Amino acid sequence: MLRCTPFLLFDGNCAEAMTFYQESLVGSLQLTRLVDTPMKAQFPVSKHQRIINAHLTSGAIEISAADWMASPAFDPVLGNMSALFVTGASAEELRPVFDKLARGTQQAHFQDLHSMPFGVYGQFYDRYGVQWVFRGGSAQQGPSRTT
């Protein structure tokens, strides 16, 4: 079953912000630092303490977040630091929605669904400028997207 929650991007203070939200909402918070994942080899040591995944739950409230990991050519500015986060069980479940929403997307920041150490991942800004981030629990990649 697909789910959609807010996704927030921070510039190095994700742990601080999400801890504040957790204390304010009295919820459960899971934080994963880049250094604790196999992905650390893909980033400079200066980013290893950044949060690669944060997930807060408090009753019916869910918020996901991460620290900014994009290239310096795409700086974090207010307006591109939030997204809609769609999760599903597999690439096969995500693919139809991903492809429909990606029609007319900005190709400069498009990442097709692909396998990552934590499952399937993809993201893009749609034709209206809304950022969408997709994550599936299965690392099996679905059929390739056609553009």
Image (spheres, rainbow, N blue to C red):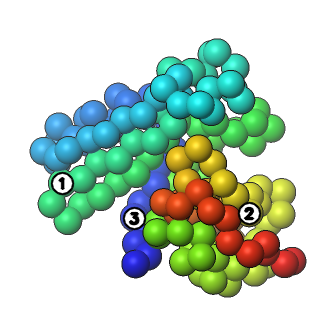
Task: Give 88 or 45, whichever is nearer the viewer.
Answer: 88
Position in image of residue 47 (x %, y %): 60, 22
The residue pinned by badge 2 equals 112
> Which residue is located at x 35 percent, y 47 percent?
55
Residue 12 visible in the shown view: no
| Residue 105 marker | none
Position in image of residue 135 (x %, y %): 53, 60
For the residues labelled 2 and 1, the Cα–Cα distance comes to 31 Å
Task: Identify the amino acid type marked 1.
Answer: Ser
Earlier-in-chain disc, 2 versus 1: 1
Image quarter of residue 3: bottom left
Q: Tag 2: Cα neighbours inside 10 Å, few (<14), some, or many (≥20)?
A: some
Residues at discs 3 and 2 in contact (Cβ within 8 Å): no
Position in image of residue 52 (x %, y %): 51, 37
Residues at discs 2 and 1 in contact (Cβ within 8 Å): no
> Which residue is located at x 83 percent, y 57 percent?
108
Secondary structure under the numbered disc 1 in the rendered image: strand
| Residue 58 marker | 1
Earlier-in-chain disc, 3 versus 1: 3
> Which residue is located at x 20 percent, y 65 percent?
60
Secondary structure under the numbered disc 3 in the rendered image: strand
The residue pinned by badge 3 equals 5
Q: Quadrant of the C terminus?
A: bottom right
Earlier-in-chain disc, 3 versus 2: 3
Specify the farthest residue to the right: 147
Specify the farthest residue to the top: 45
Q: Nearer the viewer, mark 3 or mark 2?
A: 2
Q: Quadrant of the N terminus?
A: bottom left
For the residues labelled 3 and 2, the Cα–Cα distance comes to 20 Å
Image height of 94 relative to 123, above or below: below
Position in image of residue 111 (x %, y %): 74, 58
Q: Tag 1: Cα neighbours inside 10 Å, few (<14), some, or many (≥20)?
A: some
